[in-house]
Each structure stands twice: as C-alpha cells, then as structure tokens.
Image (cartoon, rainbow, N blue to C red):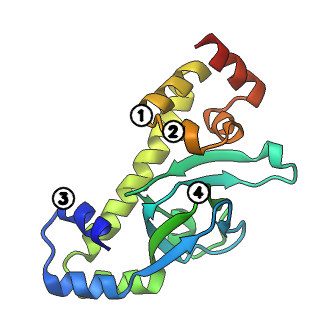
Amino acid sequence: MQQIKNYLDQIATISQADWDFFTSKLIRRVIPKKAVFLKLNEVENYISFIESGVVRVFIPKEDPDKEITFGFSFKDQFISAYDSFLTRKPSAYQLQALTETTILSITYDDLQAVYKTTQIGNLIGRLAVERLFLIKSSREQNLLNLNAEERYLKLFKERPELLKVIPLKYISSYIGVTPQALSRIRKRI
C-alpha cells in the first residue's frame, strides 16, 4: 500500500480519512507468471496499480505467433482495459502477467463510491486515465512517425530492463515488425 501512497502523495495531499476509505476498497492480487487475468470478451471490473511485475496488453489470435502486443505496464503504473471498464462492455483484448505480478485493484463499483465519498477520488481516476491515455497516444505517434529501428531504440532507451523480462516475439509485435525483422534490426545495432 505504501507504493501507491507514495505515488499519489507526489500529486496531492490526501487526508487520513480519504486514504483510509480508499485503501479499504483495494484488493491485493498476486498474478502468476504468464497468467492471463483479463480474457477476451470479459468485462474489465478493475483499475489496478502495479506494485511489482510486468503486464502485457494484447489481442489474442488462434495462432499465438500472430498475437498483437500493443502495450506493457510496469511497477508503479496503473493497468486496466479501461474502455471496457468505463463502458461495462466486453474487452477486445487481454491482460497477461509476464512475470509474477502483484497489483492493488479497485472494482468499478468501489471506485464510484470513492468518487462520491472522498476528495481524492476524482484525482485517482484522473491519474489512471491520464496515464493510460499517454501510453496510447505515445504508441500511436511512434507507429506513425518512427521507423521500426527507431521504435526499437526508443523503447529500450526508455525501458532498458525490457530485454530481461519480455520475450522478443512480444517486443517485435509491439513495434510492428516480424520477429525476423527485429532480429535483423538487432544485428545492425
């Protein structure tokens, strides 16, 4: 709980009453390595804060080699299939723990109660939404403005630890190239 408190304290001062109410709604979940914890066509019921671990956001395909990875989330970040969470409609993608991952989750209904009851509720919601939007926007801009080699270099300049924990097939999908093309890029660099 201290990690999420430290994260939120950087942005705003939280009263003890608000903090106590908010934390009473959090559920700590430990997701095993490689486990899919939101499946295709399930409604997302949580916004979660990652205490430790790495999460992959992807569109599954019948052939696992054709899956489309379009996001990663790490320690001290929020994760959710937020469009499904907001609309209460089935998700078009999945969330998978790439390492054993510990998350603090709040349900849709409990978040609504936090919004209504506390002064920090809207701040927490806004922070989660802003973070998810920035990731989406950055990815779209990178796909439109950078070539594959530039996307690869940017990814590892920003997150050098990725090579240790994320399989190359997911990285190649994320930057929009085949594993063979990624192999050629890595040889050139």
Q: Residue furthest top?
A: 188
> Which labelled disc corresponds to residue 10?
3
The mark nearer the N terminus, 4 or 2, is 4
10 Å crowding of disc 2: few (<14), some (14-19), many (20+):
some
Label 4 vs label 3, nearer the camera: 4
Quadrant in which residue 7 is drawn: bottom left
Q: Earlier in the sequence, mark 3 or mark 1?
A: 3
- Tell me if residue 181 comes above or below residue 168 in the rendering: above
Q: Position of residue 6 (x, y in %)?
A: 23, 64
Label 1 crowd bin: few (<14), some (14–19), many (20+), radius 10 Å = few
Tag shown at residue 116? none
**Label 3 secondary element:** loop
Q: Is residue 129 left or right of residue 173?
A: left
User: The N terminus is located in which quarter?
Assistant: bottom left
Residue kind at label 3, given as amino acid type = Gln
Q: Which residue is mark 4?
A: 99
Q: Which amino acid type corresponds to the residue marked 4 in the rendered image?
A: Thr
**How much space separates mark 3 and mark 2, taking CA atoms?**
25 Å
Cα–Cα span, label 4 and label 3: 27 Å
* Residue in the image at 51% along x and 38% along y: 139
**Marks 2 and 3: in contact by CB < 8 Å?**
no
Residue 158's tag is 1
Q: Quadrant of the C terminus?
A: top right
Residue 128 placement, left or right of 179? left
Q: Secondary structure at mark 1?
A: helix
Residue 139 numbered mark, or none: 2
